[in-house]
Amino acid sequence: MSEVNQTLLKADGFELGTVSPVDGTISDWKKVAVYQNTLNIEEEDPEITQHKESGKRSAKKVITIEGAETAVFQMMDSDPDSMVIALGGTVTTLDQKKAWNKPKGYGATRIVALRATTVDNYQYIINKGTISGKKVFEFSETGIALFECRVMAMDTGFDAIPDVQWKQV
């Protein structure tokens, strides 16, 4: 019998990890505060090419290229260390006070792993992805500083490690 999975994220169920370029293992998982109801998985439509014989309706050959898969979410922790996760750059400390420094020019590709755990103990995992982000700061009495982030799944480079997983835990 099939199940209907509840995709409500656990309160502490969102993490980003470090991917080893040597063997694809993931370490240093860090909890990330995700703004309520903002984690979405987007998958582009596949590109489908049909090769048909002249005068025929049906294809002789069909080539399908799957669309990219991306996790989109908003981080709500605006301390300098979190800004580095979302936006790149560096953190400097002077007189025991941290400052985030925006990167100059084009930054290098930042590679992460993403793990989201639901209340009914399923996990959505991107084993290797590139992260990008932007500031969404609202300066008002009811405003909050958020970072809109995207993690696009990439080829892990290892046949034994899937690019994306959905599994029970």
Image: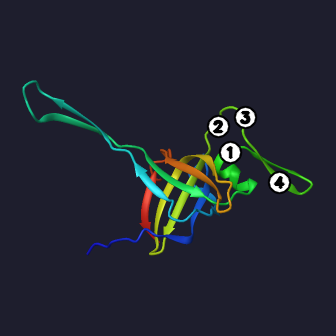
Q: From where the camera sits, is residue 22 visible?
A: no
Q: Tell me how far mark 4 sits from mark 2, CA to CA.
A: 23 Å
Q: Give the number of the mark in front: 2 or 1.
A: 1
Q: Is residue 1 left or right of residue 76?
A: left
Q: Quadrant of residue 3?
A: bottom left
Could you tell me if the residues under marks 2 and 1 are in contact, i.e. CB atoms within 8 Å? Answer: no
- Answer left or right for 121 relative to 58: right
Q: Secondary structure at mark 1?
A: loop
Identify the mark nearer the N-term, 2 or 1.
1
Nearer to us: label 3 or label 2? 3
Q: CA distance from mark 2 to mark 1?
A: 9 Å
Where in the figure is residue 39, as x and y percent of width and height? 50, 59
| Amino acid bearing label 2 | Ala
Residue at (50% x, 53% y) in the render? 72
Q: Which residue is mark 1?
A: 88
Secondary structure beneath label 2: loop
Q: Dot 3: few (<14), some (14–19), or many (≥20) neighbours within 10 Å?
A: few
Q: Using the numbered discs, state the Cα–Cα distance from disc 3 to disc 2 in whole angstroms.
A: 11 Å
Mark 4 nearby-residue class (10 Å; few <14, some 14–19, many ≥20): few
What's the distance in space between the residues labelled 4 and 1, CA to CA?
Answer: 15 Å
Tell me the number on the disc at residue 98: 4
Amino acid tagged 1: Gly
Indicate left or right for 34 with 44 as reference.
right
Q: Which residue is mark 2?
A: 108
Q: Earlier in the sequence, mark 1 or mark 3?
A: 1
Measured in 3D between alpha carbons, the distance from the residue under mark 1 to the one under mark 3, in whole angstroms, is: 10 Å
Q: Which residue, given by chain and number where applicable, does mark 3 sit on?
A: 104
Mark with earlier residue (4, 2): 4
Q: Amino acid at mark 3?
A: Lys
Q: Residue at x 64, y 54 (%)?
A: 138
Q: Nearer the viewer, residue 150 or 15?
A: 150
Instruction: Answer left or right for 139 relative to 156.
Output: right
